[in-house]
Amino acid sequence: MFKEFKFFLSQPLNVKTLLITNLLFAMVLPLINIFAGAYVLRTTGNNFTILIAFQLCMYIGIVLSAIGNGLLMKYFKSVQLYGFGILISSVSLIVLMFLKNPSTAVICLAGLFIGLATGFFWTNRYLLTLYSTTDDGRNYFFGLESLFFTIWNIVIPVAAGLIIQFTGTHTLFGHELSVDNGYQFLTILALIISVAACMVLSRGNFRTPESKNYFHLRFHRLWQKMLTLAGLKGMVQGFIVTIPTILIFKFIGNEGSLGLIQGLSGALTAIVVYILGRISKPKHRMAIFGVGLLVFFIGALVSSILFSAAGALTFIICNVMFQPLHDLAYFPTMMKTIDAVKVLEGREEYTYIMSHEVGLFAGRAFGMLLFIVIAFAFGEGGADIAVRYAVLIVAAIQLLSLPLAKSIVKDIDTKYSK
């Protein structure tokens, strides 16, 4: 353990700053990714279609903020916009949790604002990581970051689920508490953590982009392949957030069950992903990528066949394993592609980060709309059919990511190696 801590301390200042910042904000992300959806389900009487619409509006907000971030970078530093995204993400979550009996339109609007806020976080996170790391060190960076995310995905859902259950059955100073009070307490705590993350972020010494022209429509063939890969990744992103919540509410229980299951299923993955990030090399990424894709497909297949509590548990366990494995290989590959294509086209890195968000959104929109179309096409019971089969469809399509990613890496290492 001391050896690993010493290795962390040997990293450059900006790498350590980003990792500690992300360690803190990773405590907030489960509340955004899991319990915001659970709150929407609770307030809408378990209406799965409204939850999917909420998630789609979040993704619209993310792509809009990626574009807005490109405009604002003419006047503000990326690190400032990064901190802004961290703070506003928590504020937006607070607004959602304090709404009383919101209509569908209000829920969708709240989703849009949460997406706008988190978009500033994600896009600037990618850019600052790209500036601060090299290809050889990115496996370690994303492996350690995935460890943080996975640990908090274990601890925070369990703790949050217990808090929500506690407030639903107890009183405080003679005042009868409710489940909503539990959600509100969690969001205020998230804001405090976000302020701490911004304080850490301010200690970094990050570079500022030289060019301010980020808006382009035509790209090199190599980046077009990467945008296609982003679309395939985006297809499953909405489902890995919403489907576990839906399955648990449908087959297993409430927020307490949600937190406990999310937590227990990630314990082993946290250790495995850190070890892989520590010892693996760039040449091992496609093997890790392929394993992650296969695990997700197996989980979706079992869930679709059984469509029961056992199927739900299988999917959740596979999903928790898939996400960090997939990200460990995907993000270094994306950044390696940016390193190559920025030289080929002579453009600023943020051009590709912004267009990457558009590619992700195209896939996210396809996945979410597929769910909504299936749900409405089959009328009564259509939502159950969508839950059962939409995720399997996108998981099968997602398998195409492996040969495409291999083609991208091969092109970089051969055609564009110089």
Image (cartoon, helix red, strand yellow):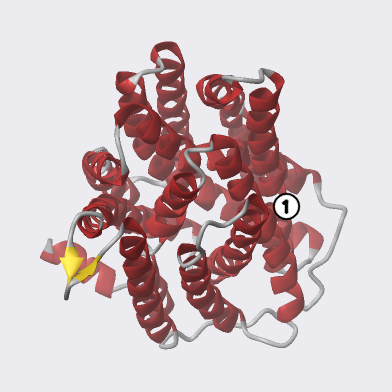
Q: Visible in this render: residue 282?
A: no
* Number of disc labels: 1
Q: Position of residue 96 (x, y in %)?
A: 51, 64
Q: In the image shown, does 2 or 310 lie closer to the viewer?
A: 310
What residue is shown with label 1? 358
Q: Position of residue 158 (x, y in %)?
A: 23, 51
Q: Position of residue 241 (x, y in %)?
A: 47, 43
Q: In the image shown, does 371 or 163 lie closer to the viewer?
A: 163
Relative horizontal placement of residue 333, taking residue 376 as reference (left or right): left
Q: Position of residue 347 (x, y in %)?
A: 77, 67
Question: Looking at the image, which residue is at 58% across and 68% down?
Answer: 117
Number of other residues with Cα within 10 Å of mark 1, as a class: few under 14, some 14 to 19, many 20 or more: many
Residue furthest to the left? 2
Question: Looking at the image, which residue is at 55% across and 43% down?
Answer: 51
Relative horizontal placement of residue 80, taking residue 26 as reference (left or right): right
Residue 139 sits above or below residue 242 on the image = below
Q: Quadrant of residue 214?
A: bottom right
Q: Visible in this render: residue 356?
A: yes
The quarter in which the C terminus is drawn is bottom right
Question: Looking at the image, which residue is at 65% across and 45% down?
Answer: 412
Q: In the image shown, does 175 or 272 lie closer to the viewer?
A: 175
**Amino acid type of the residue that numbered disc 1 sits on in the rendered structure:** Val
Residue 267 sits above or below residue 1 on the image = above
Question: Looking at the image, which residue is at 26% across and 64% down?
Answer: 177
Q: Quadrant of residue 323?
A: top left
